[in-house]
Image (cartoon, rainbow, N blue to C red):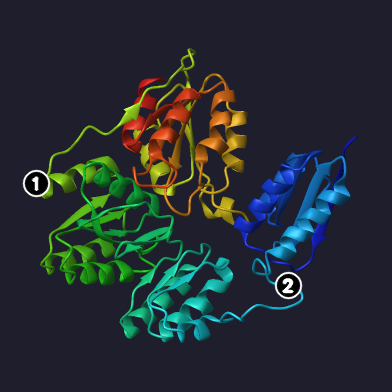
Amino acid sequence: MSSDAVLVRKGTYHDSVALMRISRALTEMSGVEVAMVAMATELNLGILRDLGFTVPAADPGDLLIAVRAHDTRAAVEEADRRLTAGRHPEGAPADQPADQPPLTTRSAARTGADLVLVSTPGEYAFAEAQDAIQAGLPVMIFSDGVPAAQERRLKELAEAQDVLVMGPDCGTALIGGVGLGFANVLGPGPVGVVAASGTGAQQVTCLLDWAGTGVSHVLGVGGRDLSAEVGGLSTLRALRMLDEDPATELILLISKPPSPEVARTVQDSVARLRTPVLLALLPEIDLTEAAERTLRALGRPVPEWPSWPAWSGKQSRAKTIKGVYSGGTLSAEAALIAGRAGSRGGDFVDYGDDAYTRGRAHPMIDPTLRVEALSRAHESDLVLMDVVLGHGADPDPAASLAHAVARTPATVVIALIGTEGDPQDLHRQAAAFREAGAAVFTSNAQAARHARSLV
């Protein structure tokens, strides 16, 4: 007979990806029904309550270990063993520290670094990014939850130091062929991308890759950069940098609707550049149309975007579209195209939003919340969702999600964002989701239009 154990480790922080891996390892132990090792955020506490655990008082800076198992003691001991092992390099004795790595951003900057990537919780990101900028290094801030006033201050400092700040909440970048954050495998080419939208940049560049057109650089600037509070400071710098890059023949700027005042500033800047600039601003055009316009501007043909019809689609006609997304821009685009379809309209959730990622891994890595969403769907629902491939993402999303797609009574349509060079094997992923009953599209806009046609 199984029993529950819930432990709180006060003031103990661990990386959310490492915690997700430990949770998975515990779940695979014999006799373990449920295991969750996570920071005690409100979201994670709510999940534990939904799972039927009695949750003690805890703060977001505390670590939770919750197991339901025949032998909870063995599961907790295994959790502790893995948490301790994560603090020591493989092969190093637990009581002997290995070579001491730099302990601060300032000391790391003195080791000959070319760029600093900050991925701490948002409340600690400002100080680390400031140290990097003051050391004269460009910064990519992967962290979310950084206040807008701090973002503005960091970008003003960067202007004074003549360096670029990418982010905060910058999920993807590719500089000179090297991907940062969530990054697809893209060939070199003439298109330079400035993106205030991570998954928007991934969608467009993946479609360009399908068309045989590569990129010079992809510079993410963070979703708020073109807001009135931030003033487009990183966008303006990134445009100038790409204009000076001899490998860039055309610049593509991707963003959700900017502040009108900032949009005028950007357009004035664009008019002074030598390199042609194509603006892809939602909702004026969708991301697939942006890729197609880019190809036409370069004088290159636009191909048919690959798609795979459902192997065995559900027969009931859906009445409501439910968006279950990991990418904010992809979710917004799908909602614009298909959100008002159906008898009760659409219901779209971006599980990559800060509200869902604080204290847990991003849904491109951790499928838990979207698996739960699929399990709650009804026969009258059409679930429209994205699956994003590339480095940094789930190494096999079909293994994590396809069983949930097959079990849900809802009709499922998937936008599969990736390239043939990505490590997950795009064609194998598409086949697995198709066999699970989903229709699969490489264009999110086409997936949304297909979903709209089914309700």
Q: Is residue 177 left or right of residue 140?
A: left
Q: Nearer the viewer, residue 455 or 304?
A: 304
* Circle 2 residues within 10 Å: few <14, some 14–19, many ≥20: few
Q: Helix or strand or loop: what does disc 1 sit on?
A: loop
Name the spot of residue 299 as percent of width and height, x first: 9, 46
Rendered position, 347 above or below 381: below
Q: Is residue 111 left or right of residue 404?
A: left
Name the spot of residue 246 as percent of width and height, x first: 15, 68
One can see residue 349 in this view: yes
Instruction: Determine whether label 1 and label 2 are within 8 Å by CB.
Output: no
Q: Is residue 91 left or right of residue 451?
A: right
Give residue 299's mark.
1
Q: Helix or strand or loop: what does disc 2 sit on?
A: loop
* Dot 1 or dot 2, earlier in sequence: 2
Name the spot of residue 274 as percent of width and height, x first: 10, 67
Q: Residue at x 76, y 41 (%)?
A: 34
The answer to which image quadrant residue 77 occupies is bottom right
Q: State the CA–CA distance, disc 1 to disc 2.
A: 60 Å
Q: Quadrant of the C terminus?
A: top left
Rendered position, 202 above or below 346: below
Q: Residue at x 58, y 27 (%)?
A: 377
Task: Name the mark nearer the viewer: 1 or 2.
Answer: 2
One can see residue 282 in this view: no
Q: Quadrant of the N terminus?
A: top right
Q: Nearer the viewer, residue 68 or 376?
A: 68
* Circle 1 residues within 10 Å: few <14, some 14–19, many ≥20: few
Q: In the rendered image, which residue does mark 2 sit on?
A: 93
Q: Residue furthest top?
A: 315
Amino acid of disc 2? Pro
Amino acid of disc 1? Gly
Q: Residue furthest right?
A: 1
